Image (cartoon, rainbow, N blue to C red):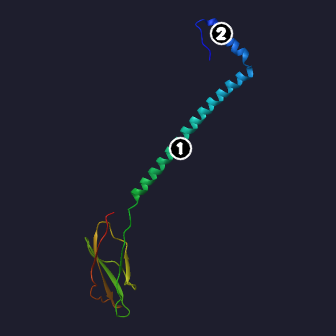
Amino acid sequence: MYAVNCSRASTIYRMKSWLKSTSLPAIFLSVFALGTLGMCFLLATHRHTGIVRRLVQARQLLTRAASAHQNDAPGPQHTVTLTWKASTTAGVGYNVYRRGSSGSVKLNSAPLGATTYVDRTVQPGQTYSYVAKAVTANGAESIASNEVTVTIPSF
């Protein structure tokens, strides 16, 4: 560094002497390098803000998609699986009944051949009671099995 005097003539003289001691290609290269670095900085800054902008847009899109999916999704699907002992009478089927807040309803449309039934129509927070009845080929039903009561979680 050099000191600048108040006199303008001495400042010009010192600048002229510095220019004479430094080659023109070195000055050109210095100015070119500074200009290039400035342009790179501007491009990098712009590129960076562009990337950040795209990342923010992608995050917003994913957040909107996730919240839309959560609003459409009914939550966890609950089921009740019932099993019972087979009847000692050969050739019978089974009817399954459910009693809830809306009354009693037969869950199967035709007699079941198996001793297992999965109720997929239960609602969260509700309490249901189930019984099974053996049914003969002509449609006669036995007395009800022991009643089982189930409370479905609300979550």
Answer with mark 1 or mark 2, whichever residue precedes in sequence: 2
134 vs 147, nearest the viewer: 147
Quadrant of residue 17 within the rendered picture:
top right
Quadrant of residue 143 within the rendered picture:
bottom left
Query: Residue 136's spot in the image, x, y percent?
Result: 34, 90
| Quarter of the C terminus within the rendering | bottom left
Report which residue position mark 1 lands on.
54
Q: Circles 1 and 2: CB distance less than 8 Å?
A: no
Vertical comparison of 116 with 59: above or below? below
Please, what secondary structure does the residue beneath circle 2 have? Answer: helix
Report which residue position mark 2 lands on.
12
**Residue flagged by tag 1: what amino acid is it?**
Arg
**Residue flagged by tag 2: what amino acid is it?**
Ile
Query: Which is more foreground, mark 1 or mark 2?
Result: 2
Quadrant of residue 38 within the rendered picture:
top right
- Distance, label 1 to label 2, CA atoms, is 51 Å
Vertical comparison of 101 with 4: above or below? below
Please, what secondary structure does the residue beneath circle 1 have? Answer: helix
